[in-house]
Image (cartoon, helix red, strand yellow):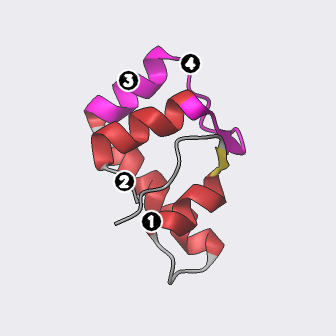
């Protein structure tokens, strides 16, 4: 099984990797819901100055997301 690369992604790009059968908007909503409901993940992201309104996830944020919810 191949995993997604740890790199910079737009939020919609990463969301579509997790939810490939959804529209970009729906996939993004689902992924953001997963992230917000995972308190340890949110705490780790906030510790590195995660900005929820940014269009992109940094490589470091993607690495943390993969660690807490698994790669897509």
**Does the stretch in magenta take in 55?**
yes
Residue at the location (45% across, 27% down)? Answer: 45
In primary-sequence order, the first of circles 1 and 4 is 1
Instruction: Classify mark 4: residues with Cα within 10 Å, few (<14), some (14-19) or many (20+).
Output: few
Figure check: 61 above or below 29: above
Quarter of the picture containing the C terminus is: bottom left
Q: Earlier in the sequence, mark 2 or mark 3?
A: 2
Q: Position of residue 30 (x, y in %)?
A: 45, 64
Residue 26 lies left or right of residue 46; in this view the side is right
Q: Say the numbered circle drawn on residue 18.
A: 1
Please tell me which of labels 2 and 1 falls first in the chain: 1
Disc 2 and disc 1 in contact, CB within 8 angstroms = yes
Q: Nearer the viewer, residue 1 or 10?
A: 1
Residue 44 - label: 3
Q: Is residue 70 left or right of residue 9?
A: left
Find residue 47 and report its image quarter: top left
State which quadrant residue 3 falls in. Answer: bottom left
Q: Residue at x 51, y 65 (%)?
A: 17
Mark closer to the chain start, 3 or 1: 1
Is residue 28 on the magenta stretch? Answer: no
Task: Label 4: state its secondary structure.
Answer: loop
Between circles 1 and 4, the one closer to the viewer is 1
Q: Which is nearer the N-term, disc 4 or disc 3?
A: 3
Q: Residue at x 36, y 53 (%)?
A: 34
The residue under label 2 is 34
Residue closer to the observer: 32 or 21 = 21
Residue extending farthest right: 55
Circle 3 packing at 10 Å, graded few (<14), some (14-19), many (20+), is some
Q: Are marks 2 and 3 in contact (CB under 8 Å)?
A: no
Sequence order check: which comes first, mark 4 or mark 2? 2
Horizontal and vertical percent position of residue 55? 72, 45
């Amino acid at each position: 099984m191949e995993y997604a690369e740890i790199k910079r992604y737009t939020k919609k790009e990463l969301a579509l990797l997790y939810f490939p059968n959804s529209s970009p908007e729906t996939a993004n909503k689902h992924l953001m819901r997963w992230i917000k409901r995972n308190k340890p993940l949110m705490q780790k992201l906030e510790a590195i100055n995660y900005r929820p309104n940014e269009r992109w996830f940094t490589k470091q944020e993607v690495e943390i997301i993969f660690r807490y919810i698994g790669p897509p």
